[in-house]
Amino acid sequence: MGTLVIACGALARELLEIVAVNRLDDVTVECLPVGLHNRPKDIPAAVAERIERARGRYDRIFIGYADCGTGGLLDRLLDDLHADGLVVERLPGAHCYEFYATTPVFESIHDADPRNFYLTDYLVRHFDRVVMVGLGLDRHPELRDTYFGNYRTVIHLAQTEDVALTAMGRAAADKLGLEYRYELVGYGDLAPSIISLGEAV
């Protein structure tokens, strides 16, 4: 029956590429709406609903989310499922920035200066929709200081080397009035986590 990966829509491009390049024919990726990024407390319920629909149809279910701002609620859901006899794992770390960069690299960057606002390739591509519109800055630019007044730098944790994306990342930083820094981190812990699912089937 294979493995189902229930993932954040912001990871769709990368997950599908990992599955295709590594010929993980037994791994199915299904993504939940990206809008949950701005409503992290809704993530566990959305994940739980999708898991229930998948029961009995797959050998294994894997969650393509880190904690992602749920404050431990996602892990509590997975613990409850484990107690009920269903073992479900998730991606490591607190958020996608951590598993893309890997924990040691992310902690090093963060510890050097915690005043960073992080973007992935996905967030760079969709910056206006997710950040500017999502936070209401397109309608109320005066909120910029409320949201970003304590930040100093936009750090683009890039999955790919792409000149166009770098320019877009720099433009995003300019819109927020912050410095721009580029860090090529690739897929970090995402790739081995997904590849191991294919090997386990």
Image (tube, rainbow, N blue to C red):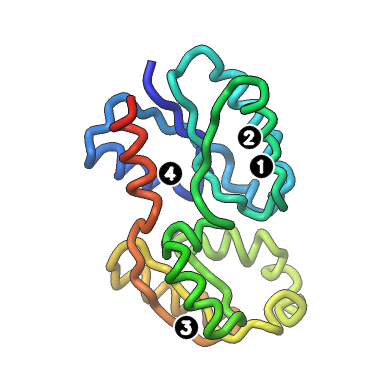
Instruction: Please name the residue that numbered disc 1 is placed on.
Output: 74
Q: Amino acid at mark 4?
A: Ala
- Residue density around tag 4, few if under 14, some if 14–19, many if 20 or more, within 10 Å: some
Q: Amino acid at mark 2?
A: Leu
Residue at 63% x, 67% y is 132
- 62 vs 188: above or below: above
For residue 180, the mark is 3
Outermost residue on the top side: it is 56
CA distance separating discs 1 and 2: 6 Å
Q: Secondary structure at mark 4?
A: helix
Tell me if label 1 and label 3 are in contact, CB under 8 Å: no
Upstream in the sequence, badge 2 or badge 4? 4
Instruction: Please name the residue that numbered disc 4 is placed on.
Output: 12
| 123 with respect to 2 (left or right) | right
- 30 vs 125: above or below: above
- Residue density around tag 3, few if under 14, some if 14–19, many if 20 or more, within 10 Å: some
For residue 32, the mark is none
CA distance separating discs 3 and 2: 37 Å
Closest to the camera, between mark 3 and mark 2, is: 2
Q: Amino acid at mark 3?
A: Tyr
User: In which quarter of the view is residue 27 placed?
Assistant: top left
Q: Secondary structure at mark 3?
A: strand
CA distance separating discs 1 and 4: 20 Å
Q: In the rendered image, which quarter contains the C terminus?
A: top left
For residue 78, the mark is 2
CA distance separating discs 1 and 3: 32 Å
Residue at 69% x, 30% y is 80
Q: Secondary structure at mark 2?
A: helix
